[in-house]
Amino acid sequence: MSFTIELVPEFKDNYAFLIVDHDLGLTTVVDPGDGEVVLRELKRRELYPALILNTHHHPDHIGGNDRLQQEYGAPVIGPAREKGYITGISRGVSSGDIVTFSTLRGEVMETPGHTDGHVSYYFPQLQALFCGDTIFTLGCGRLIEGNSKQMWESLQLIAALPDETMLYCGHEYGELNATFALAVDKDNFDLKKRTEEIAMLRKLGKPSVPTQLGVEKRCNPFLRAGAPEFREALAKARVAPLDADPAAVFGKLRTAKDHFGQKAL
Ligand SMILES: [Fe+2]
């Protein structure tokens, strides 16, 4: 079986994803925000959607469900805790549940923080995590419904996956996130290198998604709230004392980002 994961840019900076089974011409659509855009892409690639997966209930992730269901009748799987907000949902899932597509098994992980019931889908055979608005290239989702402790725990769950895991984030925020990351972690050589790489990709019109978990663990400040060298820098800059709990340090970083002048991120 040969599978690929395709990005479908939507709106200003969203991505929907297609997990494509090339042998069968079938696909799973992850987070279709704009039904028309995804529909066009499916027709262009001559693919039939067998399944729709939603990570959370925000309109830019579920707005295309209706249109795709109308056209193909594809079932929608989404977070059990947000079932009431997702029209057309056929099955609500939570931690430990398995979703299947072709020969693939996707493990459901609850990753609340951005929304209360947010889930991510981990496909070990693809080394891929569809993480919605939980973690981004060099950043993380805003705490719209959840709190910093929840989000920190969600990030820890993700950090425990193999380093080779590719993170399929719901937005193209890499370049903007790099600005904040460099402001708080300016001596991080890996971060500087990654920032240059992202700038080059964007210059060529290429996405900074997916991003590799191992790289994010070295570069993403929100995953580094427990890293000793970063903690020392934060203590020196009086952001958070050395003995602060990592979840509290994460919370302080998230608040600092909220006030960094990039409201939508
Ligand atoms: Fe969202």
Image: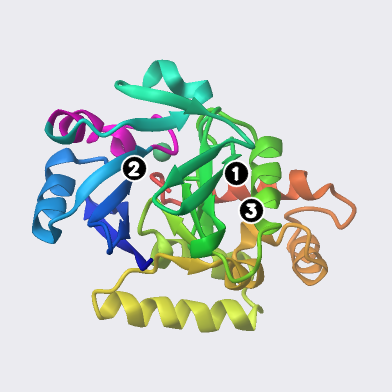
**Residue 154 location (% of width, % of height):** 65, 44
Q: Within the displayed image, which quadrant is ligand 1 positioned in? A: top left
Q: Which mark is residue 158?
A: 3
For badge 2, the amino acid type reads Asp
| Residue at 44% in and 58% down | 168
| Residue at 66% in and 79% down | 187
Location of residue 73 by image quarter: top left
Q: Callout 1 environment at 10 Å: few (<14), some (14 to 19), or many (20+)?
A: some
Vertical comparison of 250 with 227: above or below: above
Q: Is residue 105 left or right of residue 36?
A: right
Q: Which residues are magenta?
A: 54-70
- Mark 3 or mark 1: whose residue is earlier in sequence: 3
Q: Quadrant of the N terminus?
A: bottom left
Q: Nearer the viewer, residue 250 or 209?
A: 209
Instruction: Describe the colour scheme in one phrase.
Output: rainbow
**Residue 146 location (% of width, % of height):** 59, 30
Question: How far apart are the two marked residues, 1 and 2, measured between alpha carbons?
Answer: 27 Å
For badge 3, the amino acid type reads Ile
- Mark 3 or mark 2: whose residue is earlier in sequence: 2
Q: Which mark is residue 31?
A: 2
Location of residue 21 by image quarter: bottom left
**Residue 124 location (% of width, % of height):** 56, 59
Q: Which mark is residue 255?
A: 1
- Mark 1 or mark 2: whose residue is earlier in sequence: 2
Question: How far apart are the two marked residues, 3 and 2, measured between alpha carbons?
Answer: 19 Å
